[in-house]
Image: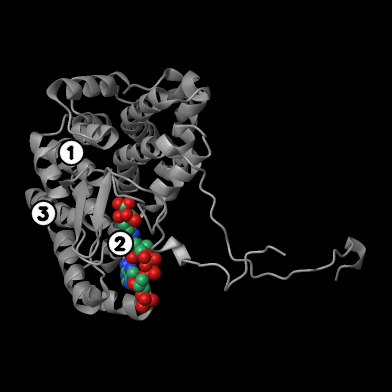
């Protein structure tokens, strides 16, 4: 019979080394530790671009003209607000919910109440990409206010994506340095090839389901501690270690007991993640500005010991290692770090879907069957 037996089929655990799509959105050189968005090195994006411009580049394949950028910014600004209906639903969410669950549920609500969801086409999908990108910061900050017994702060239309998010979340317009660092963090997180959450989004979209459903799949996937959830875990780890002197023993014990050090290792990078290198600079800058450098110094020490012990295995800091320290020094609570990852990555998720749908084919891999065959059905009264 035509079961899928071992020996007859190739199997790659965790799909390692499997090529699932052809893309012109981003490329990672894991050996050299390089990342490009549409050909442009990530270092140049971080230096010169903005999140809004990055979104245009990833969605539409080229840097925008001044007019194209203004048009996109205007569309994003117009879509920032949430309806009273969505806010009313959110008021009923438990105050102690995981903000990633809140985000997943709220995006699902947006999809359920979007009249265009039933007739998707490329134009509609672009509109939905813009809508989700515009509204996710509002969802995260509205929930944070509501869980603290406060009313959500409505978005402002004169602020950048990064500044408006911080304003709605913390109640103050950030100073230009903080705004710029948040903008850079969003640029760095916007896209990363065929990572788990992007793949999850693409699998959902490949069935010709709608974009909201695909982003809901992606949010659920990003939440896990092996993926976007690691940034939150890094801070818990720093807290658990407690002091610079404890770092070496903690790391060596973890490695001996085969426990993972959060924010280290990567399926593709066998060198230093270039995004982590940039975020490290801002983690240092902000911790010095705040006069609270302990976690940064502990981070550097963890890095030194990890590279000494397992650098030869290709284990280095990844994007999640220093991002949490950056957000922490902005006064952001740690359970919002992974939602902030989603706030930015929604652009990469939707860019890949838009690209893949141009020549869509449903994702449908196979599995090697290693169970029994020719087993006879036993009636319930005869079962032991
Ligand atoms: C992100 O894919 C993307 O692009 C993701 C991402 C994006 O932008 O979308 O870059 C964002 O998800 C970053 C990763 C965040 N996760 C973590 O920081 C969690 C800790 N790291 C890992 O668990 C791990 O490195 C993964 C999940 C990131 C990668 O897993 P793999 O490729 O399946 O590797 P593995 O778990 O099979 O590890 C291979 C070896 C093992 O040693 P051996 O058994 O071969 O001796 O490396 C060791 C592992 O024990 N190892 C680690 C380690 N990561 C790997 N050892 C200690 N600490 C770690 N963090």
> Does 38 sit above or below residue 255?
above
| Number of other residues with Cα within 10 Å of mark 1, as a class: few under 14, some 14 to 19, many 20 or more | many
The local crowd at label 2, few if under 14, some if 14 to 19, many if 20 or more residues have their Cα within 10 Å, is some
Query: Which callout, 2 or 3, points at the residue further toward the start of the chain?
Result: 2
- Looking at the rendering, which quadrant does residue 215 occupy? top left
Label 3: few (<14), some (14–19) or many (≥20) C-alpha neighbours in 10 Å? few
Q: Is residue 323 left or right of residue 267?
A: left
Task: Kindly state the secondary structure of the residue where label 3 is placed.
Answer: helix
**What is the C-alpha distance between the residues marked 2 and 1?**
25 Å
The residue pinned by badge 3 equals 281
Q: Residue at x 42, y 54 (%)?
A: 224
Residue that badge 1 annotates = 183
Query: Taking the image as drawn, is residue 155 in sight?
Result: no
The numbered mark, 1 or 3, whose residue comes first in the sequence reads 1
Q: Which residue is mark 2?
A: 268
Whole-percent x, y for residue 178 in the image: 13, 39
**Residue at 44% across / 49% down in the picture?**
221
**In which quadrant of the rendered image does the N terminus lie?**
bottom right
In this view, which residue lies farthest toward the right? 381
- Say if 7 sits above or below 42 in the image: below
């Amino acid at each position: 019979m035509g079961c899928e037996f071992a020996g007859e089929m190739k199997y790659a655990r965790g799909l390692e080394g499997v090529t699932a799509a052809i893309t012109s959105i981003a490329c990672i050189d894991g050996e050299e530790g390089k990342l490009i968005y549409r050909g442009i090195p990530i270092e140049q994006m971080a230096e010169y671009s903005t999140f809004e411009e990055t979104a245009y580049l990833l969605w539409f394949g080229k840097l925008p003209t001044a007019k194209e950028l203004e048009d996109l910014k205007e569309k994003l600004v117009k879509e920032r607000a949430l309806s009273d209906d969505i806010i009313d639903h959110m008021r009923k969410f438990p105050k102690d919910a995981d903000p990633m669950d809140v985000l997943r549920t709220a995006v699902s609500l947006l999809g359920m109440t979007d009249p265009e969801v039933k007739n998707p086409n490329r134009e509609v999908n672009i509109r939905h990409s813009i809508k989700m990108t515009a509204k996710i910061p509002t969802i995260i900050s509205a929930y944070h206010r509501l869980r603290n017994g406060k009313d959500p702060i409505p978005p402002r239309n004169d602020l950048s994506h990064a500044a408006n998010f911080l304003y709605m979340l913390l109640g103050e317009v950030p100073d230009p340095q903080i705004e710029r660092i948040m903008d850079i963090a969003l640029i760095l997180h916007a896209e990363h090839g065929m990572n788990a959450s992007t793949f999850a989004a693409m699998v959902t979209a490949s069935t010709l389901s709608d974009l909201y459903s695909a982003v809901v799949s992606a949010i659920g996937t990003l939440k896990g501690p092996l993926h976007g959830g690691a940034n939150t875990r890094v801070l818990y780890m720093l807290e658990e270690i407690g002091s610079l002197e404890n770092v070496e023993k903690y790391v060596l014990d973890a490695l001996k007991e085969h426990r993972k050090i959060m924010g280290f290792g990567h399926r593709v990078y066998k060198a230093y993640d270039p995004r982590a290198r940039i975020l490290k600079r801002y983690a240092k800058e902000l911790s010095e500005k705040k006069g609270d450098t302990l976690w940064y110094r502990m981070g550097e020490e963890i890095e030194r010991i990890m590279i000494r012990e397992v650098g030869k295995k290709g284990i280095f800091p990844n994007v999640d290692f220093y991002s949490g320290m950056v957000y922490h020094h902005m006064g952001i609570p740690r359970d919002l770090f992974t939602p902030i990852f989603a706030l930015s990555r929604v652009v990469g998720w939707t860019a890949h879907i838009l690209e893949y749908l141009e020549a869509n084919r449903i994702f449908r891999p196979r599995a090697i069957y290693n169970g029994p065959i020719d087993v006879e059905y036993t009636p319930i009264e005869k079962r032991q």
